[in-house]
Amino acid sequence: MPSLKRDVAVPLVLLALLTLGAIAVPTLSTDDPRAMGDVIAQRFLPPFTTDGHGGFHLLGTDRFGRDIFARTMLAARVSLVIGVLGSLLAGAIGIALGAFSAWRGGVVDRLLMSAADALLAIPRLILLLVCAALWRPGMWTVIAVLVATGWMAVARLVRAEVLGLRSRPFVEAASALGARPSRILWRHVLPNALGSATVAITLGVGGAILLESGLSFLGLGVQPPQPSWGNMIADGRDAIVIAPWVALAPGLALIVTVVASTFLGDALRDRLAGESATALRDRA
């Protein structure tokens, strides 16, 4: 258990530091990270450089003299909001539909799962590209597309868990005591079925951030002057030889965030699996 706590603590600390930086750094920055700086005096300054106006640039500047560190942290706001909100909304819809499908069964179950299977058969990136091309690119469009294409896997997981739990003795006992079916589902069955869904949602945060960055890199996601890690990497690819820090800083931030989210999901899976087994054994 101590090692499991450390496994949870490390990614949580990394994500907490990133969130704190995303909130504090752009707010405390003396210059607007979206606005052009002094292009002549501040263009492509390397990391740990002080410009002619006395401003210190921890990660250097880009082609327009904008501070890379402030822009990376401002882009973290966008990525975290899109990743967390998109994954949570998709997870909530998947949990509700998966639980309802398993509990009702019959035609409802077949229709919902057939729709989920049909959408799962289409590569998610293709769906994202088509939807992003059809509607105006932007943060809320990306969130809506991520929700519309991300609920199916969670729904399948929750459905499988509910189908396995509905025959457990504590469900039969609650039914014998006169509890309504809806109360049995939402009060007794669903809380025990959320372990795998929680892990899937946590892992989905990193996947959603990665997909958003890919769309922004292609110009179909968050649009300039609002920075995102994807469009910052795209801006820096032309200067990768003379100013590699322009693309390297957002790229490293993207890698750290996705890896931390993945490790957190793996640690939660181990913890919730043990707690769920203990809870079911006690109920039985």
Image: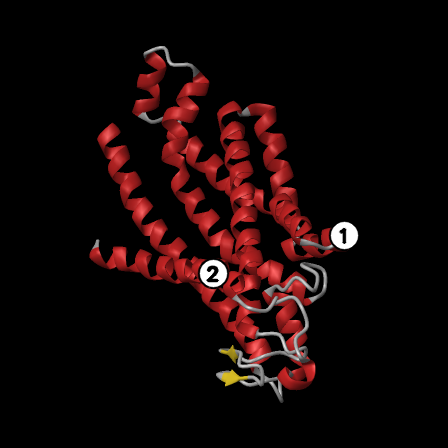
Q: Marks 2 and 1, how far apart in space?
A: 30 Å
Residue that carries the numbered disc 1 in the rendered image: 136
Mark count: 2
Is 38 in front, or is 247?
38
Outermost residue on the top side: it is: 178
* Residues at discs 2 and 1 in contact (Cβ within 8 Å): no
The residue lying at 45 percent from left, 43 percent from top is 197
**92 vs 172: above or below:** below
- Asked whether residue 284 appears in the rendered view, the answer is no
The answer to whether 116 appears left or right of 177 in the picture is: right
Tag 2: amino acid? Ala
Residue 85 x, y percent position in the rendering:
54, 47
The answer to whether 42 appears left or right of 264 in the picture is: right
Query: Which mark is nearer the camera, 2 or 1?
Result: 2
Residue that carries the numbered disc 2 in the rendered image: 24
Element under disc 1: loop
Residue 232 x, y percent position in the rendering:
63, 70
The residue lying at 24 percent from left, 38 percent from top is 278
Tag 1: amino acid? Arg
Mark 2 crowd level (few <14, some 14–19, many ≥20, 10 Å Cα): some
Identify the image quadrant of residue 210. bottom right
Residue 92 x, y percent position in the rendering:
52, 38
**196 vs 83: above or below:** above
Outermost residue on the bottom side: it is: 242
